Amino acid sequence: MQSPKYLLWGPLQKSLLGPAFDVKMTLMGDWYLYSACFLCLFVWFFFGLNYLCLNTSDILLFDFFSLVTDAPHINLERSKENERISKDQIKKRKKKQKGYQPNYFLSIPITNKEITRGIKILQNAILQQDERLAKAMTSDGSFHITLLVMQLLNEDEVNLGIGALLELKPFVEEILQGKELILPFQGVDTFGNQVGFVKLAEGHHINPLLEIAEAAKRTFQEKGFMAGENRSFKPHLTFMKLSRTPWLRRKGVKKIDPKFYEKFISHTFGEEMVHRIDLCSMLKKKQSNGYYHCESSIVIGKRPIGLQDLIREALRRERMGLKSKVKQIKELLLKPETQARIRRELLEGRPASSRPGGDPGDRVLQAPPRTPGPERGHATGHDCSARS
């Protein structure tokens, strides 16, 4: 009995392939049969699945998009709202930055005579080559390192800035851990050929100085002050600025020629031991020694306190006391009852206590009348005892 595979493939192989391939067809017939069956099942499955998808596509798509689009709808609105708020905050910040004009700064004064003497030699060497730059030079007594710039708009903010400076002291002491901070100066460089400065030499002193500057910026910003700059902090000792002499640009002086200071490129100027940080004004009149107007100071390190430090501290405390008294007087004069009392006395030309029904509080502020006579004095004494 012949198998079904032979009945299916026998005539085909005899008519097309011939008897020479009968053995090969016998071996390969099973594979062809199974392949044909698998192909038929695949075609049936494909068209059946396609039919189901066409009839249910609307439902499937609706369910899918309802899950995908409806869920993040609220999140999309929230993201738009957050984006709007972020843009408003950026606008406000830019508006504040446009009005940001620093007028105060934290200063480390340079007091080492060796450093100041070396800077004067440098300045004189430059002036010998171009004496027109005299007004661009930093004056004697003003040499310093700027730790931080800020904007203080009024005396109240200045007082808050003094408080922030005092709060900075324990942070500085924690950074230094009882060690001295010594800053060596060596070499000369410029910022864009516009600002000439003496460079701070590299060494282990850089990190604590940067930490102090960062602590100062954080302390003042936490008080709500606009402080700091966009560029990174680079400690330097300025000895000249072309911005002080804008008229020189019209005369052809647009930059600091490197030839002016080439002999000082590797010059060693000396070391400064940091002992004080000052809160100084950029705009107020400088002191008689050429240094900036100083609102307050903190002493750091182990430098012994001299007579000048004691005098400076005493003057600072006296100035703070006077400011407090002036503030109290201003507040008293702004009170409506005080203004009304002054107005009555100026308009009527006589003390309020002499008028009938005068305010007893006004009588306390008035001096007793000096009318001679025992009866008047007796009455006055009686009146005082009655009050008591």
Image (cartoon, helix red, strand yellow):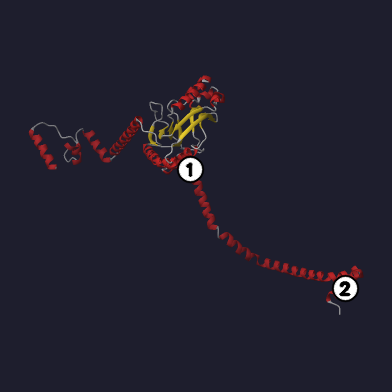
> Residue 218 is drawn in which quadrant?
top left
Find numbered disc 1 in the image and state the secondary structure of the residue it sits on.
helix
In the depicted structure, whether residue 44 falls above or below residue 174: below
In the depicted structure, whether residue 127 falls above or below residue 49: above
Query: Which residue is at a point 46% across and 24% down the rendered structure image?
Result: 117
> Residue 388 is drawn in which quadrant?
top left
Q: Is residue 191 left or right of residue 336?
A: right
User: Which label lies toward us, 1 or 2?
Assistant: 2
What's the amino acid at mark 1?
A: Arg
What's the amino acid at mark 2?
A: Gly
Reading the image, the residue beneath label 1 is: 93
Give the camera-side residue of 202 and 213.
Answer: 202
N-terminal of the pair, mark 1 or mark 2, is 2
In the picture, the quarter occupied by the N terminus is bottom right
Q: CA distance from mark 1 to mark 2?
A: 90 Å
Answer few, some or many: residues within 10 Å of disc 2's Cα (few below 14, many 20 plus, some between 14 and 19).
some
> Residue 7 is drawn in which quadrant?
bottom right
In x, y percent, where is residue 56?
65, 67
Is residue 307 in view from this perspective?
A: yes
Q: Is residue 39 left or right of residue 18?
A: left
Reading the image, the residue beneath label 2 is: 10
